[in-house]
Amino acid sequence: MSIQIPRGTQDILPGTSEVWQYIENKARELCRRYQYKEIRTPIFEHTELFLRGVGDTTDIVQKEMYSFKDRGDRDLTLRPEGTASAVRSYVEHKMFGWANQPVKLYYVGPMFRYERPQAGRFRQFVQFGIEALGSADPAIDAEVLSLAMNLYKELGLKKLKLVLNSLGDKESRTAHRNALVAHFEPRIDEFCSDCNNRLHKNPLRILDCKKDHDHELMKTAPSILDYLNEESVAYFEKVKQHLDDLGIEYILDPTLVRGLDYYNHTAFEIMSDAEGFGAITTLCGGGRYNGLAEEIGGSDAPGTPGIGFALSIERLIAALEAEKVELPIEQGIDCYLVSLGDAARDYTVKLAYQLRNAGFAVEKDYLDRKAKAQFKSADRLGARYVAVLGDDELENDNINLKNMATGEQVEMALESFVEEFKKQQS
Ligand code: HAM
């Protein structure tokens, strides 16, 4: 049997890769306007980074990591997300000392999670993400959110829902955590073994449990909003005020718990509301992670605030398909060279080379096909012009250029063809 692609991965073929490029270019362009700079980190990291960064009670760390030992007996993991790596790099390169603060980074690249593959859920997927490190200004929260929303909007998506919550600062989280333990502990034996393990380590994770989702205690669990201290409330109010000023609508959801441990204060997800969009509707997730740099880098980066988001291109494309958005992807080529006869065919090798050097997208025949088949190829490729060169024309130093939109044909001197073609285009 022939070898097939691993489960949960996909080949992006020509025809579709143009859609990916269009989206990635749009993301990069937005980052330029918002002044986020690209960072490229390794695809594998020391496993310890994700244990400390993402959190050892999360599903990602416990069940979904592609971890392995290399030949030097090191514990390595294919990155399941980009934030831990960006923050590791921030600390390692002492970016907190850079002249421009806050440090604003973006990345585009593959992430790996051993999840059950289904629509919108892959084992290898590509995240576009941004991270702003070094500022605790609520205005940055609004900036990060607005960049994510603008990417979707500028691509033509309309059916979006921004869901917002605050997880508060350390003090608020501790108070909420104690309340959660008190709430679940008396009946914890009715919950799955994962939840039992989570109770004292990280009770917030219980709210995110896929198995016990419908247990009655879930609905009556203490809400974080009742445990936010004054400072956390004030911070959240300011974030909301900025969003209101920018005209960005949101829905407050005190039950929004993100699947990673590093969050505090602002947490959010952007969902698709489009009809026919699959069961998994979250397009983008993110939030604030003040203190993660310290967790990863120790005393080098005490108290560094940070915020960011990540979204997968796979789910973005699924949303575009659900909303039937056609991206304005440029197709077609500038010129197809049709040749009739051996000498003419040889000549088109040189002509194609010259036209391509002049910046044009050009194709010619390589299968020794008849003129009719060559014209068909030109049509299929969306050629704006077709240049026809026969052995007779070659002898007379002539070439025939046909404008495919108007049907107009002109004869030109072969010698000056490239120059003439350039003039026609300008
Ligand atoms: P996350 O919620 O785990 O957050 O993932 C962010 C986004 O990645 C999701 O909303 C979804 O679009 C996409 N995604 C996750 N898993 C899959 C999958 N198996 N298949 C396809 N797409 C997937 C993070 O990764 C955080 N690092 C986000 C962040 C950045 N927070 C702060 N900065």
Image: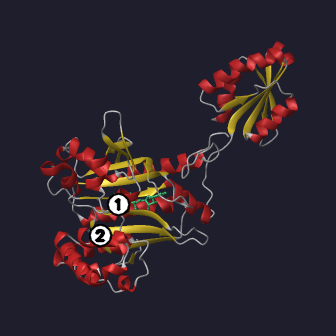
Q: Percent from the top left, x then y, of residue 247?
A: 40, 72
**Alpha-carbon neighbours of circle 2 within 10 Å: few (<14), some, or many (≥20)?**
some
Residue nearest the viewer, comparing 29 with 187: 187
Name the spot of residue 272 as percent of width and height, x first.
Answer: 51, 69
Residue 284 badge: none
Q: Is residue 149 above or below residue 26?
A: below
Mark found first going from the N terminus, 1 or 2: 1
Cα separation between marks 1 and 2: 31 Å
Relative horizontal placement of residue 42, taking residue 234 as reference (left or right) = right
Looking at this view, is 79 or 232 the one in front?
79
- Amino acid carrying mark 2 in the image: Arg
Q: Is residue 144 left or right of residue 295?
A: right
Whether residue 105 is visible, yes or no, is yes
Quadrant of the rendered image holding ligand 1: bottom left
Q: Nearer the viewer, mark 1 or mark 2?
A: 2
Q: Name the residue under label 1.
A: 144
Q: Which mark is residue 198?
A: 2
Quick one: 328 or 8, which is closer to the camera? 8
Q: Count of labels shown?
A: 2
Quadrant placement of the N terminus: top right
The quadrant holding residue 240 is bottom left
Q: How crowded is mark 1: few (under 14 residues within 10 Å), some or many (20 or more)?
A: many
Quarter containing the C terminus: top right
379 with respect to 306 (left or right): right
Looking at the image, residue 162 sits to the left or right of residue 263; the answer is right
Residue 86: tell me if it is visible: no
